[in-house]
Image (cartoon, rainbow, N blue to C red):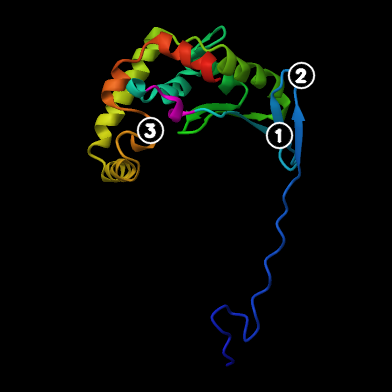
Amino acid sequence: GRDRGTHGRGAGSPAPPPPPKIAPIERRTLTNGLRVWIVQMHEVPVVDVSVVVTSGATADPVVKYGLASFTAAMLDEGAGKYNALELADAVEFLAASLTTASSFDSSVMNLHTPASKLDQALSLLADVVLRPTFPLNEIDRIRKERLAALLQARDNPASIAAAGFARLVYGAGHRYGTPTMGTESSNGRVVADQKRGFLPAYY
């Protein structure tokens, strides 16, 4: 038989890759100055919304490393008229999902919803972004979860290596040298007023 080559196409060259199909980005600005980027793809009747705040762990005060991360974690633990469980139930009732996260340089609130439920889902997202309540019982619960996670990281080789590499590259004095979650001592000092202070300052 003929030598078909390593790619199974004989002596010829592989076919060129198809050109990428990238939907155009519509850029708009709301009357309040908020910039909105829209990408329309109508194959599936769902909508994804990401609210991006261009501030994250690098804005943490030196003695309060983990503040931005904690703030993002608390946003969906009670907002508007809902407590944490009620908010989760309201999101689930719409067959939607709502998550929050923070990195070194940004904080993001993500909404995934059926297009038919967009108005109701956006209302819940607005509560999370603009009207979080930071209930003390949820602050205590999240703080304990984070302290447990920090302890578990001590026994995880991958976590140790990542933290050690960042400390080696950036040093102890640079924010990038400490994980976004902060340390046990900084998480132990978290109180509701800090969250309410970080939110208006950076969101």
Pointer 2: what residue? 31
Pointer 1: what residue? 37
User: What separation in Å lies between label 1 and label 2 (alpha carbons)?
Assistant: 15 Å
> Which image quadrant for residue 9?
bottom right
Residue 101 screen position, x and y as percent? 48, 29
Residue 166 versus residue 193 in the image, above or below: below
Residue 133 versus residue 39 in the image, above or below: above
Label 3 vs label 2, nearer the camera: 3
Q: Which residue appears farthest toward the front when viewing the image? A: 173
Q: Residues within 10 Å of mark 2 (few under 14, many from 20)?
A: few
Which residues are the magenta region? 56-61
Residue 121 screen position, x and y as percent? 65, 21
The amino acid on which the numbered mark 3 sits, given as a three-letter code, is Arg
Q: Nearer the viewer, residue 30 or 136?
A: 30
The amino acid on which the numbered mark 2 sits, given as a three-letter code, is Thr
Q: Secondary structure at mark 3?
A: helix
Instruction: Please identify the quadrant where the C terminus is shown.
Output: top right
Using residue 2 as the reference point, say whether residue 194 is left or right of it: left
User: Measuring 54% from the left and 14% from the top, which residue is drawn there?
Assistant: 200
Labelled disc at residue 88? none
Of the numbered discs 1 and 2, the one sitting upstream in the chain is 2
Labelled disc at residue 175? 3
Label 1 vs label 3, nearer the camera: 3
The amino acid on which the numbered mark 1 sits, given as a three-letter code, is Trp
Q: Is residue 187 magenta?
A: no
Residue 189 screen position, x and y as percent? 31, 15
Q: Nearer the viewer, residue 52 or 23?
A: 52
User: What separation in Å lies between label 3 and label 2 (alpha carbons)?
Assistant: 35 Å
> Which image quadrant for residue 10?
bottom right
